[in-house]
Amino acid sequence: MKTYITRINGWSLRDKSHYMQHMVAEAAHQLGCREMGIFRYYAEDEGGESLGSRLDGIIAGINRGDLVICQFPTGNGMRFEHELVYRLKAYGARIAVLIHELEALADEGKKSLLGSIVELYNQAEVLIVPTYAMRQWLLDNGIHKGMKFVVQEMWDYTVREPLFNTPTFRKEIYFTDSEGFEGMADWNDSVPLNLYNASAGQGNVRNLGEREPYQLLSELNRGGGFGLVWYRDTYSRQYMEKSNSFSLARYLAAGMPVIVPAGGAHQTLVEMNHLGLAVNTLEEATALIERMTEGEYREYIKAVEQFAPAVQNGYFTKKCLCEAMQAFYRKDAGRLPLPERVYETGECVFRSSVLRESYGGNVAFSWDFQGEAEGFLIYDTKGALLGNTRDLHQHYLLLKKLKSENGVIIKAYLETLKGKLVLAESEPAYLQEGSCDSPKVSLIMPAFNAQDYIVRSIDTALAQTLPDLELIIVDDGSTDRTSEIIDWYAGHYRNIAVIHQKNRGVAAARNTGIVHAKGNYIGFLDSDDMMRPDMTAKLYETIRKNHCDIAVTSVYRMTDYGYDKFIQYPMKEDTAVTIDEFFLEYYIRECGYGAVIWNKLYRASLVKSHFFPEILSEDEGWTPCVLSYADRVCYLDACGYEYDRISLEGSLADKVRNRSKEERFEIYKKVVMFYLKNGNQDRLDLLKALAKKRLLENARVYVCDEYEKLWQEIA
């Protein structure tokens, strides 16, 4: 009994399909398989007698019980493949099919082939499929339930000769597929695009021409940047969720990190092994590359170097071939190695979804989801997939090229063996305009040279579910495009007011906003942070329900490592407490984390009576002062505010920390003296207790006696 592997001959190795078949056959040879050579030609017009003679010659060495692994499609057409399998079975051979490409799924124009393909595959005992998703799709479309499956997981790209180079840090993208993607030819992004195909390019595109496979591998190995795996259109993107990319293996074999679509078959493999970026859009990819440091790129290179030998040595191919050969003899072969899952989903619902026009010709989509899921799919109302994210903290997505008449729908999903299980779907969201004749809440945003991130902050403010909310943006003498951006918003939204003033600092900007605020309540938003869509509505509801002066929410901090809870109080939610209890039990005990101003909603009359001091660390002086005049406070552990420690480098807080011990002390002295002098003198004992806690703590942290001396003077 022998094992055979088919291989197509008569193609140039430049052809991807021929190269893949050649590579698989070479791996099979190393496992002791014999080759069944097939010459590629167009067989559809060949007469029956001629085709029969040709096939008899191909399978002349086959004996009953031999194993034959057929690499399909052959390129010779469905008639040829059906006749090949028919004659192999007539000779008593046992058949496995290694699926290189499922034409009926990959090409929208070949859907009519599905029935014939399923009929062909059902003649085999074993199917080697690229992914579990493809396995389930085939079962759902007519493959018989007793079929044994082997999952390939990914392609290899075997290397004949050692590669000695390491890709260097370059902010560039390489694309090697013969079929392009939308916008490829006139790519104008700041990150250069390098093509290895016959396409013509303009803009920031360099076409390097076609190469022989090993020459291409060698050039990628000597280059740098990222290899791109991308889709032509929505249909091909859906196919990528079920199939493997040969280009991915090529990049990894060359030692190059990759860019893959979020939601594709390779997202988990790439993310878990730190092999590159999984993104929703190419704009997202180029933005990440532009911000990337050489140290971050080196970490990707190290991870790829660790992974690449498995691809270069054909281990994925050898593994699936060995499993296929075992499957002929084992009754338990082909069963899923994963335990069945029990899904505990609970209540899943989208409480809101908002679509707003955003700066730069884009559209901002925001949503508020309650429940447990594994990811979100975003579609337009015509059914085109716009984005896919597995970041469950995400609630905002900037969309490009959306037709104005189309709405947007978002779906929450779980990953299952049958694909994505949709748990909840939003109502369609259509473009809305903002209006606010009589604001309930005024949000105040100071802005200075914030062009790189202020759009996101404004968009999340516009997405607030509380009606009658005004946003006041105070431009504190910006010298970049901040003024242009915020003026655009003021011209498009009636509930946005913009004030330009000479540069005087963030405290003066906030004070200007306070003077112009019309709402009964006031909140603050920094130009690099975000708000969850329901934050203002929830705080407004609880502050009014509990007759409080201030409502507080917990805070997420956004870092390079993800989200963590930055501010959280062990308080009973949605319940009023006296300001004395809040000071003693929560504010002082939290060592001043509550000094931040932007996780709170304040009664406007309270704020308008107490302006910010124009000093550094003004929030640490202003917050205790204002709190001391309040009577009741309530709290929601909703993490409504998102404090960004990624986008903005060199913040005021960082600049204060980087000062000398003496300078830091003088700054903090002004903070303490402000709230002791200007705070409610009826609660001076509480303010002094806070001052003692912070001053003695700073004395230990900064190893500076001046803090303790100041406390002795105050006491």
Image (cartoon, helix red, strand yellow):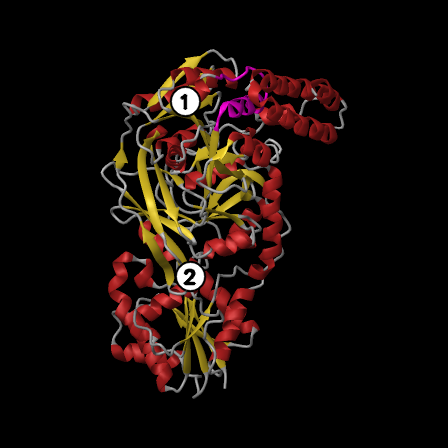
Mark 2: which secondary structure?
A: loop
* Percent of width and height locating residue 447: 46, 21
Q: Which residue is mark 1?
A: 604
* Observer able to see residue 306: yes
* Observer able to see residue 74: no
Residue drawn at (48%, 83%) of the image: 329
Q: Report the Cα–Cα distance between label 1 and label 2.
A: 44 Å
136 or 710: nearer the viewer: 710
Q: Which residues lie in the magenta part?
A: 610-631
Which residue occupies the extreme left position in the image? 405
The tally of labels here is 2
**In the image, residue 618 above or below residue 68:** above
Q: What is the quadrant of residue 474 in the picture? A: top left
* Percent of width and height locating residue 357: 31, 32
Q: Which residue is mark 2?
A: 344
Q: Residues within 10 Å of mark 1 (few under 14, many from 20)?
A: many
Q: Earlier in the sequence, mark 1 or mark 2?
A: 2
**In the image, residue 456 above or below residue 350:** above
Q: Amino acid at mark 1?
A: Ala
Q: Amino acid at mark 2?
A: Glu
Residue drawn at (57%, 18%) of the image: 681
Q: Is residue 674 magenta?
A: no
Which residue occupies the extreme front position in the image? 682
* Percent of width and height locating residue 540: 38, 33
**In the image, residue 555 above or below residue 50:** above
57 or 624: nearer the viewer: 624
Is 85 displayed left or right of 318 in the figure? Answer: left
